[in-house]
């Protein structure tokens, strides 16, 4: 069973779930939008049982103790800083980093900027950011898939998503996310300021600067039924990884891989960790 903790950092206290012995191999798991640390429930249990110390925080805006009001406080530089601050709290010189959706975007950025801190990278659903940016710029299919971001950046997004008992927010999770997780996420995001914090990730995002090649051992997992990310950026990601690289494509699985295909993802993650023990 995962244990609930709070992680103090200069930005505030992050809520988090942990599993496994504290002296175990450190693994940090970053959730996506619009979810929370419980997204990783299945992976936490397995990693903890494999003698890893797995930590999944509720990220900036999702944790009540780290919910700044200004959009600028959700820039990528701040999100990367949170990852390093959490690692520093535990005294981790190097750690394995796992991210899904927005968590993957942050993980790519951390690995690009601080490769000395990252033992392995596992990115789920979101390709290397340079590949994704190029696809949004040049690929009509990806342009259509990414169009939803404008709606999430609008000033009326909170009202729209929470209207009618959060009907449109609930619709985002289907198919793929278990009903009990949906209820948990919706409850969290109806807390004062929570949904605004989550949406500010989109409002602050500016994918107009290249992050450069990834040199650490990397696993990228993408699924064929992902409505947000097409094959163009997914297949191009290998061009942006100079370290050991593994690409896995899950058939007939939606964007919500950690919850819809937990056994497949966890198996791939464990294989990746075992292949790179140092």
Image: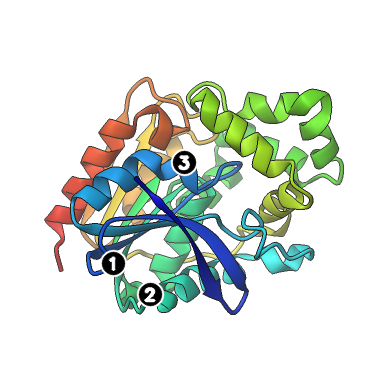
Q: Position of residue 143 (x, y in %)?
A: 62, 37
Q: Earlier in the sequence, mark 2 or mark 3?
A: 3
Identify which residue is drawn at 79% across, 63% down: 69
Q: Nearer the viewer, mark 2 or mark 1?
A: 1
Q: Are marks 2 and 1 in contact (CB under 8 Å)?
A: yes
Q: How far separated are the C-alphas under marks 2 and 1?
A: 9 Å
**Residue 17's quadrant in the figure?**
bottom left
Q: Which residue is mark 1?
A: 22
Residue 114 position (above or below residue 58): below
Identify which residue is drawn at 66% across, 57% down: 61
Identify which residue is drawn at 76% across, 62% down: 71
Q: Position of residue 190 (x, y in %)?
A: 74, 41
Q: Earlier in the sequence, mark 2 or mark 1?
A: 1
| Residue 5 showing in the rendered view | yes
Q: Which residue is mark 2?
A: 90
Residue 11 got which mark? none
Q: Residues within 10 Å of mark 2 (few under 14, many from 20)?
A: few
Identify which residue is drawn at 60% across, 46% down: 137
Q: Residues within 10 Å of mark 3 (few under 14, many from 20)?
A: many
Question: Which image quarter is the N terminus in?
Answer: top left
Q: How far separated are the C-alphas under marks 3 and 1?
A: 21 Å
Q: Are marks 3 and 1 in contact (CB under 8 Å)?
A: no
Q: Nearer the viewer, mark 3 or mark 1?
A: 1
Q: Position of residue 222 (x, y in %)?
A: 38, 37
- Helix, strand or loop at mark 3: helix
- Helix, strand or loop at mark 2: helix
Frontmost residue, 186 versus 228:
186
Q: Residues within 10 Å of mark 1 (few under 14, many from 20)?
A: some
Q: Which residue is mark 3?
A: 39
Frontmost residue, 102 versus 240:
102
Residue 125 position (above or below residue 172): below
């Amino acid at each position: 069973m995962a244990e609930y903790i709070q992680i103090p950092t200069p930005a505030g206290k992050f809520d988090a779930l942990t599993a496994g012995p504290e002296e175990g191999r450190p693994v940090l798991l970053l959730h996506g939008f619009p979810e929370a640390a419980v997204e990783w429930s299945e992976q936490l249990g397995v990693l903890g049982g494999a003698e890893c110390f797995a930590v999944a925080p509720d990220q900036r805006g999702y944790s009540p103790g780290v919910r700044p009001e200004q959009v600028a406080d959700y820039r990528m530089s701040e999100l990367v800083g949170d990852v390093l601050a959490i690692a520093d709290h535990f005294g981790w010189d190097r750690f394995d980093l796992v991210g899904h959706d927005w968590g993957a975007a942050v993980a790519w950025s951390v690995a690009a900027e601080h490769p000395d801190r990252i033992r392995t990278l596992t990115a789920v659903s979101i390709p290397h950011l340079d590949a994704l940016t190029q696809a949004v710029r040049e690929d009509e299919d990806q342009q259509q898939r990414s169009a939803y971001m404008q709606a999430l950046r609008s000033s009326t997004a909170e009202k729209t998503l929470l209207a009618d008992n959060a009907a449109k927010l609930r619709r985002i999770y289907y198919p793929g996310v278990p009903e009990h997780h949906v209820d948990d996420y919706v409850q969290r995001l109806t807390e004062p300021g929570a949904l605004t914090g989550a949406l500010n990730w989109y409002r602050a995002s500016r994918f107009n600067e290249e992050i450069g090649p990834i040199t650490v051992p990397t696993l990228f997992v993408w699924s064929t039924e992902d409505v947000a990310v097409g094959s163009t950026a997914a297949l191009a990601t290998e061009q942006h990884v100079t370290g050991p690289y593994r690409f896995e494509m899950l058939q007939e699985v939606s964007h919500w891989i950690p919850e819809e295909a937990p056994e497949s993802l966890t198996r791939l993650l464990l294989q990746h960790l075992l292949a790179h023990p140092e």
